[in-house]
Image (cartoon, rainbow, N blue to C red):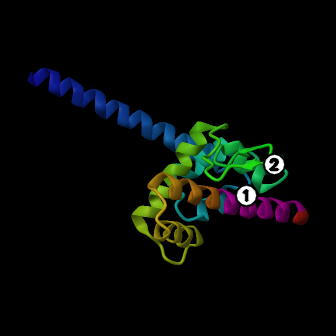
Amino acid sequence: TKTLVQEAANQLTAISRSVETYRSEMNKLASQLPEYPVVMEMYGVGESLGPQLMAEIGDVRRFERKQSLVAFAGIDAPPNDSGDVTGRHKSMSKVGASSLRRTLFLVMSVYLQTAPLDEPVCQFMDRKRAEGKPYRVYMMASANKFLRIYYATVKAYLESLEHTA
């Protein structure tokens, strides 16, 4: 039993080292992208989640509007209309990048854990919670808000870089 536990601990240590190696490589590659500084300044995004977001989203300029990016993530409300009947209870579409939704969920978890009152996404999340929305509803609504801010911030930064070049 002692040998098995020691071997499991050694394997866990080796896996942790390789994960950290991959994380640092991912961060090094992401730092070469032009939007890296502005993404890393965003609240809730750190050395792990920032490169993940940039990798999942890619170049924001390929999206015509912020709604296109939200639809790409699959956290938009689909139309629920049929003829004369207009649906009132719409769930998110979930048509899109599930790994991006997971990354956004992790970013929203950072907001929940730290609760920065001066951040617009946190204020939005608090307002949705005060309205009595369920956990996943306010988390994905906040992720939607974060993604819209991400789109506007990164796109404006990239356009400013193009104008100065």
Q: Is residue 66 above or below residue 83?
A: below
Q: Give coordinates of residue 47: x percent, y percent.
A: 52, 53
* Extent of the magenta region: 147-162
Question: Within 10 Å of the Cα at label 2, are there few (<14), some (14-19), or many (20+) other Cα atoms?
Answer: some
Whether residue 153 sits left or right of residue 62 in the image: it is left
Q: Give coordinates of residue 43: x percent, y percent.
A: 55, 65
**Helix, strand or loop at mark 1:** helix
Q: CA distance from mark 1 to mark 2?
A: 9 Å
Question: Within 10 Å of the Cα at label 1, are there few (<14), some (14-19), or many (20+) other Cα atoms?
Answer: many
Please tell me the numbered disc located at residue 151: 1
**Which residue lies under the disc numbered 2?**
63
Which residue is drawn at the image coordinates 45% and 55% (left, top)?
135
Q: Per the image, is 156 magenta? A: yes
Q: Give coordinates of residue 157: x percent, y percent.
A: 77, 63
Marks 1/2 in contact by CB < 8 Å: the verdict is yes
Name the quadrant of the C terminus: bottom right
Which residue is drawn at the image coordinates 9% and 21% (left, top)?
1
Query: 76 or 20: nearer the eye?
Result: 76
